[in-house]
Amino acid sequence: MAGETLPPMPPERLIELNDVAVHFSLREGLVRAVNGVSYHVNKGEVLGVVGESGSGKSVTVRSIMRLQPKTALDAGGAIRFRLPDGSVTELNRLPRDGREIRSIRGRHIGMVFQEPMTALSPVHSIGTQIARTYQLHTGASKEAARNRAIDLLARVQMPRPREMVDVYPHQLSGGMRQRAMIALALTCEPSLLIADEPTTALDVTTEAQILDLLRSLQAEFGMAIIFITHNFGVVADIADRVAVMYLGRVAETGTVDQIFYHPKHPYTRALLQSIPRLGQKRVHRLKTIPGMVPDPFNIPAGCVFHPRCEHAVAGRCDVAEPASRTFDGGQIARCHLADSLPELVS
Amino acid sequence: MTALADDTLISVRGLKKHFPIQKGWLQRVVGHVKAVDDVSFDIKRGETFGLVGESGSGKSTVARLILRAYTLTAGEILFRQPDGSNLDISTLREAELRPIREQMQMIFQDPYSSLNPRMTLLDLIGEPLIIHGRGSQGEIRDRVQELLTLVGLRPEYVSRYPHAFSGGQRQRIGIARALALNPSFIAADEAVSALDVSVAAQNINLLQDLQEKFGLTYLFITHDLSMVEHISNRIGVMYVGRLVEVAPTEALFAKPLHPYTEALLSAVPEPDPRARHARKRVALKGEIADPANAPSGCAFHPRCAYATDRCKAEVPELRDMGQGRKVRCHHADGLSLTGVIPA
């Protein structure tokens, strides 16, 4: 799909993905890791992206940053991003290490990774890493950049920021490292922050601290966040809207209330039922999704979820791939049966 | 050595493990990491005892001590034998431990690094059978196929290698291997933490089915509180090497007695967007203490909202509070803490 044919983005829209596809050509065959993903984020909004491993949630956001592995093929679709001056660029058309994307990456779009130990440089102090980023994008003096680093470390509630500015990542605990990573991502006050499983490796109490921090920083800086996680609890805590991904596609998107209380896709419903909840009367067995995520070389025909779906209709779901359908309130689901599913009893 | 209650399978008393910190080329011992410090609890026959705590709290070390993968610094581990007698296994030598090892097994967290990639499922699951001399080659093959069926894998898979399986299936291979010798006790260390939700649910159900079928006793270690609530009969909460609270599951979640338990419960993100504002979160200041340099008195006092001078000076004892509850807090009687309000 060529970018020209898309309708213009509404003014409140920050980023919009239309039918994005990313494929990998391997010896064993072609892997369609991302196969027609569409979602959008408005200014100042938090989009939670959930899905199991292999659903393509990380590959999708990496293609927003143009940080895919070299072997990734841009196989179609458009990623449009609105710059602060109001103009719109098509990120997917920019060369992966060209000047334009480098002036956006780190400046207008920041990213926080799951494992700060591998994402931060082990041989530079955290202050240096923040200061260099700031100098690169703003041309500030060394002195000003160092002060900026101290200020940011204070804003991510790092204790004693004046001392911490000179420590190296290995000297920090997991939670503190993640704070440093967030400070780095916010250096240039980006309008979009991409957070790829930022709390998955942390303990619950630290996770709660980081989620609180992200929420208060979001209120302070007003940036939008794409928050990737596989934890529905975290999504319920931080997201305004949710996209549920399965096998390189978006199964369903909607507001958090729509997704949690009126899910329209059987996959969303099954996932929500398979998690144990605190304080719930002890049920004898957890509800499971039969089978497992198919391997990427043998994607099922028709609806990719049909072999595991309890509602699948033979002759329909295994034949035709369902199109995205929009429902009341902007909820979108990719399921033939979305409006005929029985009400959820919870 | 005191006697075990009739329904107790394992009793851990005053368990300690201090790892030396060595420095310089002489490897002088300059201090100790008190990974496990004075931990005592009982596990009843046929129950699931959950052990929760943050990373570095010593929960995995406890499991490894019970299985005698580490040597103890101090303490007793009483383990009931099939004939009903009880045996302190904490001082047994390696050769004496061998018959005991058949009865206790472990399931590991990472199904990728805990299975040798060069061994077929027959070798992997058959290995404990060979070591303990359980039958001929043909018998072992039959037993491995039976075990595969038991964990929901196809018996034809015996000659495949682990790389051909997904994370959830590999975890099942680990479970089959743990079951090979018909143990009475299994320690599952973060057994489903690395798995996706739908697969984790399948494996949890499998573990419960196997428990029913064989009367297994589990020590279930995890940092996932909703999972531990689902699977455990009783729960122990650890903080910096010490057990701070032990209670039956429902009681612990309804009304925690230790301030750390309260904070831990309130930190769990609930999959319910409407609860976002309804719930009051007990924010914990700072980070978990370093077990090499634990705070004086109660190790939780620098982060505790209820701490007094006494907490800084005096290490609280694990006190019996009745109804199967124990807590290690000076102020447990006077506090009224909030648990999880049922949805």
Image: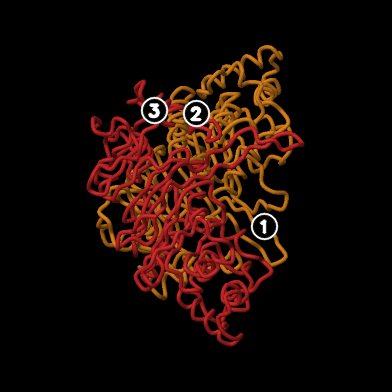
Chain colours: A orange, B red
Query: How far across and how far down the image is residue A2, in percent?
Result: 61, 48
At label 1, counting other C-alpha atoms closer than 10 Å, the crowd grade (few under 14, some 14-19, many 20 or more) is: some
| Residue, disc 3 | B314
| Residue, disc 2 | A223
Which chain hosts label 3?
B
Residue B47 appears in the rendering: yes
Does residue A250 lie above or below B278 as drawn?
Answer: below
Disc 3 and disc 2 in contact, CB within 8 angstroms: no
Amino acid on which disc 3 is placed: Glu
Mark 3–mark 2 distance (CA, rounded to whole Å): 47 Å
Residue A54 appears in the rendering: no
Amino acid on which disc 1 is placed: Phe
Amino acid on which disc 2 is placed: Met
Query: How far across and how far down the image is residue B83, in percent?
Result: 38, 72
At label 2, counting other C-alpha atoms closer than 10 Å, the crowd grade (few under 14, some 14-19, many 20 or more) is: many
Does residue A216 lie above or below B256 as drawn?
Answer: above
| Residue, disc 1 | A24
Mark 2–mark 1 distance (CA, rounded to whole Å): 32 Å
Does residue B273 lie above or below B234 as drawn?
Answer: above
